[in-house]
Amino acid sequence: MGESQMLEGDDRQAVEALTEAYAQITRELGKVIVGQQQVIEQLFVAMFARGHCLLVGVPGLAKTLLVRTVADALSLDFSRIQFTPDLMPADITGTEVIQEDRTSGIREYRFLPGPIFANVVLADEINRTPPKTQAALLEAMQEQQVTVGGDRHELPEPFFVLATQNPIEQEGTYPLPEAQLDRFMLHVWVDYPSEEEELEIVKRTTADHDVQITSTLSAVQVMALTRIIRRVPVADHIARYALWLARRTRRDDPDAPDFVREYIMWGAGPRASQYMVLGAKARAVLHGRYFVTHDDIRALAAPVLRHRIKLNFNADAEGFKADDIIRRLLESVPMVGDEEESRGKLPELFRSTDAG
């Protein structure tokens, strides 16, 4: 299938519009955010794939500022929830109150929506609240609704949870339950800026100037573009490559490399390969392409997998992190093309791979 046949004409125009809009959005973000290009790309990949994103890094790296600026650039309703040890589930979802009609004197329950009712919800320092309150996000993230008093309340579209988290080794943090971690499409690591980037940050933040962000896309446009991204085709051998990366993180898989059996307690579930393919589609479109490549899958492997694999004691004792295992996995799993796949060489190629 040729590139010109992959999408209908209207879709192709919409994809080109999204690529152009993404370039404009990154320019707008550049007025406020210095560097962090990979973080910004992964954030937009998650959003246009209609996934949720977890941003992890030490305090002071502008994670909160980035999310707020993204909401402004997309002209979306924004809500911020500061997670603290005393935060209650009702503080997130909302609650029912008794209201009296002054004319009739009749009392009835009325639902007061919580801050979760927004297009972009910033769950700030999500791991500073106990698991019971963290779990209040589960239904909203998975079903795009909340249930209060037995009644279901639909959340607005589009709906994204962009959470920030401090490293769990810090005092006063609670590890997120695995069920909630799995709801996040991407686990994005926000690293320290380079020396030149930090110098630019210092100069900007210590000067007296006001930056105005120009809105680029509306909520309706964002929803339309997310539907188009799902229509971007992906070749079978590309989808199979994502599947291999996910399955080979599981100890009991017959083709799992030796280092997986040695260092991983449990591996990624089916959501991993789904999100790699869906994220790869979004990344391809953001880069102006109408087709998915191995590089798109590889670029999403770490943020998709790093919170879905659990390392064992051996890995901790030897100082291995999830990213180290994923890096070795990318070295060991072959990138097979159409020609090799059509000749039926996939199993043979895979069994011969182990980076050792």
Image: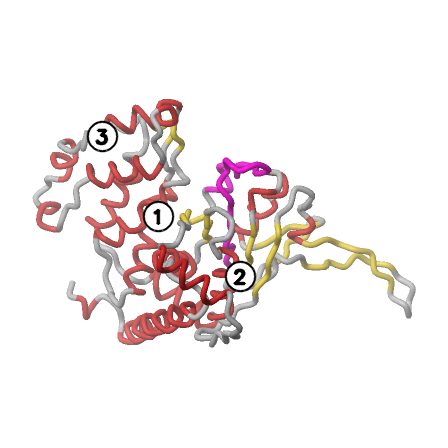
- Report how far apart the C-alphas of labels 1 and 2 lie in the structure: 23 Å
Image-based side of 110 in relation to 134, left or right = right
Tell me the residue that label 2 is attached to.
120
Q: Which amino acid does label 2 sit on?
A: Val
- Neighbor class of circle 2 (other Cα within 10 Å; few <14, some 14-19, many 20+) is many
- Neighbor class of circle 3 (other Cα within 10 Å; few <14, some 14-19, many 20+) is some
Mark 1 lies on a secondary structure that is helix
Tell me the residue that label 3 is attached to.
255
Q: Is residue 222 above or below residue 323?
A: below
Q: Quadrant of the N terminus?
A: bottom left
State the residue in front, 257 or 255: 257
Answer with mark 1 or mark 3, whichever residue precedes in sequence.
3
Count of numbered labels shown in the rendering: 3
Mark 2 lies on a secondary structure that is strand
* CB under 8 Å between discs 2 and 3: no
At a point 51% along the width and 72% down the height, the residue shown is 75
Q: Is 12 included in the stretch rendered in magenta?
A: no
Tell me the residue that label 1 is attached to.
274
Image-based side of 126 in relation to 38, left or right = right
Q: Which amino acid does label 1 sit on?
A: Gln
* Numbered range of the magenta stretch: 159-181
